[in-house]
Image (cartoon, rainbow, N blue to C red):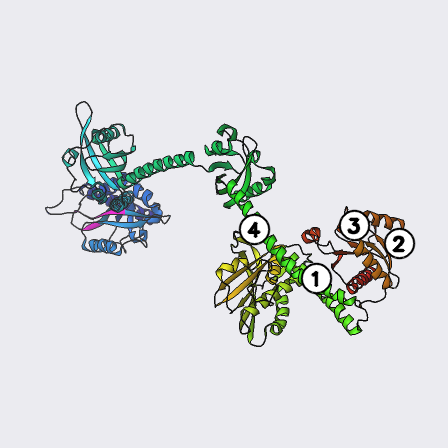
C-alpha cells in the first residue's frame, strides 16, 4: 500500500514538470523570422488559436505522421467542405479531390510539400454531397524555434462563383462578338454630346460592326464625330438620338439621310450608364425597298386610275356581286344600256332584272362560281327599265366572297343568229324536201307501175308475184328511208339500254371483213384505260344498241367506199373526259366513250367537210349512196346525248369519232327473246284495235281477222277505255296507234297499266315526238309501215309474255 502511494506521487511530480516545460516552450515560441526565412515561425498555440478564430477556411497537417494527415480544421473549413472535424482529422487532403481535379495541380502541391516550400494553386475539390468547387489553396510550412518543420498550414478560398461569373462573362462576350460580327444589319455604339442647353449637337462613333460600312456606305469611323464624317446630316437624327440618350426610351423609325442618299430602318436604345450618354443603333439600308414601294404606289395609283376609267368608259356591263346574288357595285353602262339607275341596282338581287325563263341557268352559274369555277359565255335576257329585254353574254371570275362579271350586249348577234338559223333551216328544208321528193317519187313510181301491171287481165302468176314482191321491197326501202330521216332529225323512237360498246364493236368487227373485202386490212383497238385503283374501266353506254350498230356500220361503209377497195381500216375505242369544240359548240367536259373509225382513203375536201352530215349530201357517184348514212350517225349521236366529229386530210385519210356518254353499272343481259312463227293462227285471241286513221284501222282489223284474231276497233283512247270498262275481262290485248287526237297512245297505255295491269299493250307509230323524246315507257312498239307478219308476231309475243308473268 505504501509503495503504491509513493509511485503515484512520483508520477504526479513528473507530470507537473512536463507541464512547466511545455508552458516555457509555448512562451518562447513567438519570435521574428530569421533573415531570408519565407515561412512562419509562430508558436503552435498562437497558430491554432488564430486559425480557429479566422473566417477563412484553414487546415493544419502534420508531416511527421504517416501520409501527412489533417490534425486541425477550423469551423470555416468544415462549413466549406461539409465534413465534420471527426471526418477530417487523421486523413490526407487528397480525399477531397475527384474526377475533375487537375493532376498537374496535384503534382504541384505534392512537389511543394516535398520541398517544404510555399505554394499557391487553384484546384477542384468536392463537397461532402459530391458537388465540385474551385478552391484557391495557399500552403506554407510552419517551423519550430529550433528550425525544425512542425506543420503545414493551408488556407482556402472558394473561387467557384468568381470563375463561373468569369466564364459566363467570357461566353457572353464571345456570343456578343459573334453576333456583332455576323449580323447583316449595321450596328454601332455612339456617344452623344450636348450643349449647355441640353440639346444634342454631335455624336462620336465608339464601336461599329463589319456590316456598318456595307449598310451605311461609310468606312473608318471609329473615334470620329459624325459632324466630321457626315457634315450635312439632318438635325432630326441628332434630336432623335439625343432624346434616347437622355430619356432611355428606345426609338424605332424609318428616315432618309439626304447627305448619304439612302433610306434607313433604325432601332436605337440607350446603353451603359445614363451619364455616359451612349446609344446603340441597329439599322438596315432600305433604299431599294423604299424605291420599290414608291414605284408600286405610283403604279397602283396609275392602275387604279386606269381601272376607274375603264369602269366608267366601258360599254359592257360590269358588276361586283356576292354569292348571295346581291349587286355590290355596277358601272354606268347599266344606265346607258338598260336604263336602270345605279341606286336601283346596288344592293338589289340579280334575279329582279332577269327574264323568268333564264333564272335557273343564272342560279346554276352563281353556284358554279361559288365553287371556284370560272364562268364563260352565259347568255341570258336582262330586263330594261321600259319592260323590254336585251340578250347579255356574261363572263365572270370568282374572288373571295364575291365575283367580278362582265356582260356584253349580244342582242343583235342573237337576232342575226336566228336569221341565219332560219335561213339555214329553210335551205335545209328545201334540200331535204327535194331529196325526199326525188327518192319517194322513185319509190312511188315502182309501186304505181307494179299496181298498174297487176290490174292487167290474164296476168301470169309468175309476173304477178314479181310485181307484188317489187311493191313489198319498195315499201321496205321507203320505211328505211323514213327511218334515216327520223334519225337525222333526232325523232326516231329509240330503245335505250346499258350495253358494252367494246362487245358491240367486236360483234360488228366480225362482219366488217364481209363488208370491206379481202384487200382492206381491218384493225380493232379497245382500251378504255384503268381506274386510279388499277382496275380496268368499262365502256358502258346507255343508248339503243341496234341504232349504235347501224351507226358503226354506216361509218365503216363510208370508210370502205373512200378507200376504193384497198387500204387499212381501224376501229378504236377509248375513254375520254371531254368532247372537243366543234361546229360552234364549246368544249364539253364529262365522261365519254369515243369510237373512232379511220381509213387511209382519199380524204374529204375542206370546203365540203361541214356538209357531210346533211341529208342527201354525198360526194359519191350516182347510184353509190343515198347521202343518209352519215345523217343517221349524226342524229343518233345527238339524240343519245353525244356528238360525232370528223377529221380529214386529202389523200391521207379520214377519221370519224362517235362520242357517247359513259355510264356506270352493268350491261343489260343479252338473252334473245324467242320469236313466234310468222302468220300463225291467232286462235281466237281478242284484240282491241285503237286507230284514228280509217284506212289503217280497217286494214289492221281485216288482217287480224283473217289470221284468226277476234277484233274490235275504236278510233280514240276515250272509246277504248269505255270499251274496256264495259267488257271487263273479254280483251286479251290492246293494239293502239300513238298519235291520235285527245289522249295519245302512251297515255292510254299508262291508264290501262294502272287499271288493268295484267292486260298487255302494243303501240304502233311511224313518228311521235313523245316517243322520240321520252321513249316507249316499257310498251312494245311496232313501227309503221308494218307488215301482217310483223303485226302477228308482236301481238303473239306480247300475249305470251303477259301470260308468263
Circle 3 packing at 10 Å, graded few (<14), some (14-19), many (20+), is many
Q: CA distance from mark 3 to mark 4?
A: 38 Å
Q: Which mark is residue 444?
A: 1
Query: Which residue is the site of mark 2?
Result: 729
Query: Which residue is the site of mark 4?
Result: 424
Query: Which residue is the site of mark 3?
Result: 748
Q: CA distance from mark 4 to mark 1?
A: 29 Å
Q: CA distance from mark 3 to mark 2?
A: 17 Å
Tag 1–tag 2 contact (CB < 8 Å): no
Give the farthest residue toward the front.
Answer: 457
Q: CA distance from mark 4 to mark 2?
A: 54 Å
User: Of helix, strand and loop, which mostly describes the magenta segment?
Assistant: strand
Tag 3–tag 2 contact (CB < 8 Å): no
Where residue 357 sits in the image (x, y, percent)?
61, 40
| Image quadrant assignment for residue 618 | bottom right
Q: CA distance from mark 1 to mark 2?
A: 44 Å
Task: Tell me the element at label 4.
Answer: helix
Instruction: Answer left or right for 555 relative to 695.
Output: left
Q: CA distance from mark 1 to mark 3?
A: 34 Å
Where residue 513 sits in the image (x, y, percent)?
60, 74
Tag 1–tag 3 contact (CB < 8 Å): no
Q: Does label 4 or label 1 sit earlier along the sequence?
A: 4
Seen in the picture, residue 772 relative to 348 is either above or below; the reply is: below
| Image quadrant assignment for residue 450 | bottom right
Is label 3 or label 4 in front?
Answer: 4
Quadrant in the picture for the C terminus: bottom right
Q: Which one is nearer the viewer's eye here, 160 or 64?
A: 160
Circle 4 packing at 10 Å, graded few (<14), some (14-19), many (20+), is few
Is label 1 or label 2 in front?
Answer: 1
Verify whether residue 262 appears in magenta: no
Where residue 789 sits in the image (x, y, percent)?
79, 65
What range of the chain is rendered magenta? 135-150
Amino acid at each position: 500500500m505504501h509503495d503504491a502511494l509513493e509511485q503515484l506521487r512520483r508520477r504526479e511530480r513528473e507530470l507537473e514538470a512536463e507541464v512547466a516545460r511545455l508552458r516555457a516552450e509555448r512562451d518562447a515560441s513567438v519570435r521574428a523570422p530569421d533573415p531570408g526565412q519565407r515561412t512562419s515561425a509562430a508558436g503552435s498555440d498562437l497558430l491554432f488559436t488564430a486559425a480557429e478564430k479566422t473566417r477563412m477556411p484553414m487546415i493544419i497537417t502534420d508531416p511527421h505522421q504517416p501520409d501527412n494527415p489533417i490534425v486541425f480544421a477550423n469551423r470555416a473549413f468544415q462549413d466549406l467542405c461539409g465534413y465534420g472535424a471527426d471526418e477530417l482529422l487523421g486523413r490526407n487532403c487528397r480525399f477531397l479531390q475527384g474526377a475533375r481535379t487537375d493532376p498537374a495541380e496535384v503534382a504541384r502541391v505534392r512537389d511543394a510539400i516535398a520541398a517544404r516550400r510555399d505554394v499557391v494553386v487553384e484546384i477542384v475539390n468536392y463537397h461532402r454531397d459530391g458537388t465540385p468547387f474551385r478552391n484557391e489553396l495557399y500552403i506554407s510550412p510552419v517551423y519550430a524555434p529550433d528550425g525544425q518543420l512542425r506543420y503545414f498550414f493551408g488556407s482556402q478560398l472558394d473561387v467557384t462563383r468568381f470563375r463561373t461569373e468569369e466564364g459566363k462573362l467570357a461566353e457572353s462576350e464571345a456570343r456578343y462578338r459573334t453576333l456583332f460580327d455576323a449580323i447583316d444589319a449595321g450596328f454601332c455604339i455612339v456617344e452623344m454630346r450636348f450643349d449647355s442647353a441640353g440639346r444634342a449637337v454631335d455624336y462620336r462613333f465608339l464601336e461599329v460592326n463589319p456590316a456598318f460600312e456595307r449598310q451605311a456606305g461609310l468606312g473608318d469611323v471609329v473615334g470620329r464625330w459624325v459632324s466630321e464624317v457626315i457634315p450635312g446630316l439632318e438635325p432630326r437624327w441628332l434630336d432623335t438620338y439625343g432624346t434616347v440618350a437622355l430619356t432611355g426610351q428606345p426609338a424605332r423609325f424609318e428616315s432618309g439621310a439626304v447627305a448619304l442618299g439612302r433610306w434607313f430602318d433604325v432601332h436605337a436604345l440607350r446603353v451603359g450608364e445614363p451619364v455616359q450618354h451612349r446609344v446603340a443603333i441597329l439599322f438596315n439600308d432600305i433604299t431599294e425597298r423604299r424605291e420599290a414601294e414608291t414605284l408600286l404606289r405610283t403604279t397602283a395609283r396609275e392602275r387604279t386610275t386606269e381601272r376607274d376609267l375603264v369602269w366608267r368608259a366601258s360599254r359592257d356591263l360590269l358588276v361586283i356581286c356576292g354569292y348571295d346574288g346581291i349587286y355590290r357595285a355596277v358601272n354606268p353602262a347599266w344606265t346607258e344600256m338598260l336604263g336602270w339607275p345605279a341606286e336601283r341596282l346596288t344592293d338589289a338581287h340579280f334575279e329582279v332584272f332577269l327574264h323568268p325563263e333564264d333564272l335557273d341557268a343564272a342560279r346554276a352559274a352563281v353556284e358554279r362560281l361559288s365553287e371556284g369555277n370560272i364562268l364563260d359565255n352565259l347568255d341570258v335576257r336582262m330586263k330594261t327599265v321600259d319592260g323590254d329585254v336585251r340578250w347579255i353574254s356574261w363572263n365572270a371570275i370568282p374572288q373571295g366572297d364575291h365575283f367580278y362579271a362582265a356582260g356584253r350586249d349580244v342582242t343583235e348577234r342573237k337576232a342575226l343568229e336566228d336569221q341565219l338559223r332560219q335561213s339555214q333551216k329553210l335551205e335545209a328544208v328545201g334540200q331535204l324536201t327535194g331529196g325526199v321528193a326525188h327518192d319517194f317519187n322513185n319509190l312511188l313510181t315502182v309501186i304505181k307501175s307494179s299496181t298498174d301491171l297487176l290490174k292487167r287481165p290474164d296476168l301470169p302468176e309468175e309476173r304477178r308475184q314479181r310485181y307484188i314482191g317489187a311493191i313489198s321491197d319498195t315499201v321496205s326501202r321507203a320505211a328505211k328511208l323514213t327511218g334515216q330521216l327520223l334519225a337525222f332529225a333526232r325523232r326516231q323512237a329509240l330503245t335505250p339500254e346499258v350495253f358494252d360498246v367494246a362487245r358491240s364493236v367486236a360483234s360488228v368487227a366480225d362482219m366488217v371483213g364481209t363488208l370491206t373485202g379481202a384487200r382492206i386490212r381491218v384493225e380493232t383497238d379497245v382500251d378504255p384505260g384503268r381506274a386510279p385503283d388499277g382496275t380496268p374501266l368499262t365502256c358502258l353506254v346507255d343508248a339503243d344498241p341496234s341504232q349504235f350498230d347501224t351507226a358503226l356500220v354506216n361509218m365503216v361503209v363510208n370508210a370502205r367506199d373512200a378507200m376504193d377497195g384497198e387500204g387499212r381500216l381501224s376501229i378504236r375505242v377509248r375513254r375520254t373526259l371531254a368532247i372537243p369544240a366543234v361546229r360552234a359548240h364549246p368544249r364539253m367536259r364529262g365522261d365519254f366513250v369515243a369510237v373512232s373509225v379511220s381509213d387511209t382513203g382519199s380524204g374529204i375536201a375542206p370546203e365540203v367537210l361541214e356538209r357531210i352530215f346533211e341529208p342527201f349530201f354525198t360526194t359519191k357517184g350516182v347510184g353509190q349512196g343515198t347521202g343518209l348514212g352519215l345523217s343517221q350517225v349524226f342524229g343518233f349521236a345527238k339524240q343519245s346525248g353525244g356528238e360525232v366529229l370528223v377529221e380529214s386530210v386529202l389523200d391521207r385519210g379520214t377519221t370519224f369519232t362517235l362520242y357517247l356518254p359513259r355510264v356506270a353499272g352493268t350491261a343489260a343481259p343479252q338473252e334473245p327473246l324467242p320469236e313466234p312463227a310468222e302468220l300463225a293462227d291467232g286462235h281466237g285471241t281478242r284484240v282491241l284495235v285503237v286507230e284514228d286513221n280509217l284506212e289503217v284501222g280497217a286494214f289492221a282489223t281485216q288482217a287480224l281477222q283473217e289470221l284468226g284474231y277476234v277484233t274490235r276497233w275504236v278510233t280514240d283512247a276515250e272509246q277504248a277505255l269505255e270499251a274496256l270498262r264495259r267488257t271487263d275481262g273479254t280483251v286479251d290485248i290492246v293494239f293502239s296507234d300513238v298519235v291520235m287526237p285527245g289522249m295519245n297512245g302512251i297515255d292510254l297505255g299508262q291508264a290501262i297499266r294502272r287499271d288493268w295491269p295484267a292486260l298487255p299493250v302494243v303501240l304502233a307509230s311511224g313518228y311521235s315526238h313523245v316517243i322520240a323524246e321520252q321513249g316507249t315507257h316499257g310498251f312494245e312498239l311496232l313501227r309503221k309501215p308494218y307488215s301482217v307478219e310483223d303485226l302477228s308476231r308482236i301481238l303473239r309475243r306480247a300475249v305470251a309474255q303477259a301470260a308468263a308473268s
